[in-house]
Amino acid sequence: MSYPIFGKLRFPSLKSVQKRSFKLSDIEISVVLSPTATKWGVHREYSSSFNLYDNKKFVTEDEAVGYETCYSSTWDIKGIFGLGKNKSYIEFRLLVAKCNNGQNLFLPGKLLEVVRSETSRQFNDERYYLDVTALQNIGTWVNNEVEFTYHMNEVEHSTHSNFIEYIWSTPITENHYLQFLFGFPKNEKTASHEAAIKNYCTSIMQTVQIDLPAWVKKEKAAAASVSKDTHQTAAMEPLVWRREADTGSYLDFRREAVEKAKQTEE
């Protein structure tokens, strides 16, 4: 893959890269992605087509949400040309997820509710995670007439590098959603470059095109007609899980503080 020659921080060039397309049943997704590359020479071929309704394809482990990877890659972040040093790297994954409990993800706030629950489940494991600050900077992000839910996570891992993740999620059927996930190590090398890394990830997201067939548009329209008063979404503070020394379990300190305040008032 090509990199710009000039610049103190250089990411894989997107100018000459053709869009990569994926067909998920009748839904077509395209996005500009640099060629697959990993630091360890691991290469996996991903199919350009995928049947959303083949339940055997989703890794569920009897959980509420099952996942399948459509594409993954690792891209180096290079420094000044000729010095031969890489500054860091970005791990990218395009995931398709399936809710197994009949959630209608097109209802206002439903996708965010699912993402919140899944984030809590994934990081609630004391064997791997020392500290997690999740669901930060939650917001709506619109591109090419597609509305995404955006958030970021910071993860302190017990055996791997501490990581920052930028995640864009969007529903594509009543029960399926996509996640574009970018992660990179959080350390002294990247501290001053976080804004540039996020800008690069955002520039990739700006190339995303999702073409929905008529039946999906009908599902969306039906959900939009539901009274918003019935599906209000409460304002959400970022969740902070920290391991409790005595039990090894994780606590959401903000939620715990609210409950204690209510008990005090009573």
Image (cartoon, rainbow, N blue to C red):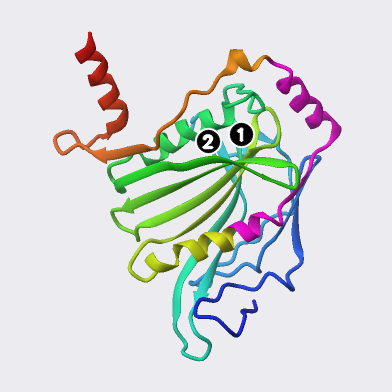
Tell which circle, 1 or 2, labels the residue nearer the N-terminal end: 2
Q: Amino acid at mark 2?
A: Thr
Q: CA distance from mark 1 to mark 2?
A: 9 Å
Q: Residue furthest left?
A: 246
Discs 1, 2 touching: Cβ within 8 Å: yes
User: Which residue is at the front of the view, 102 or 134?
Assistant: 134
Q: Say which of 186 and 39 sits in front.
A: 186
Most extreme residue toward the front is 265
Label 1: few (<14), some or many (≥20) within 10 Å?
Answer: many
Residue positioned most to the right: 214
Residue underneath mark 2: 60
* In this picture, residue 89 sits left or right of residue 72: left
Looking at the image, is 98 positioned above or below residue 151?
above
Question: Residue 123 — which label?
Answer: none
- Picture coordinates of residue 245, whole percent (x, y): 15, 39
Residue matched to label 1: 98
The stretch in magenta equals 202-226
Counting from the top left corner in percent of width and height, residue 24 is at 74, 43
Q: Quadrant of residue 55?
A: top right
Towards the viewer: 249 or 195: 195
Quarter of the view holding residue 159: bottom left
**Residue in view at x 51 percent, y 76 percent:** 9
The residue under the point 57% across, 22% down is 101
The amino acid type found where label 1 is placed reads Lys
The residue sitting at 35% across, 44% down in the picture is 133
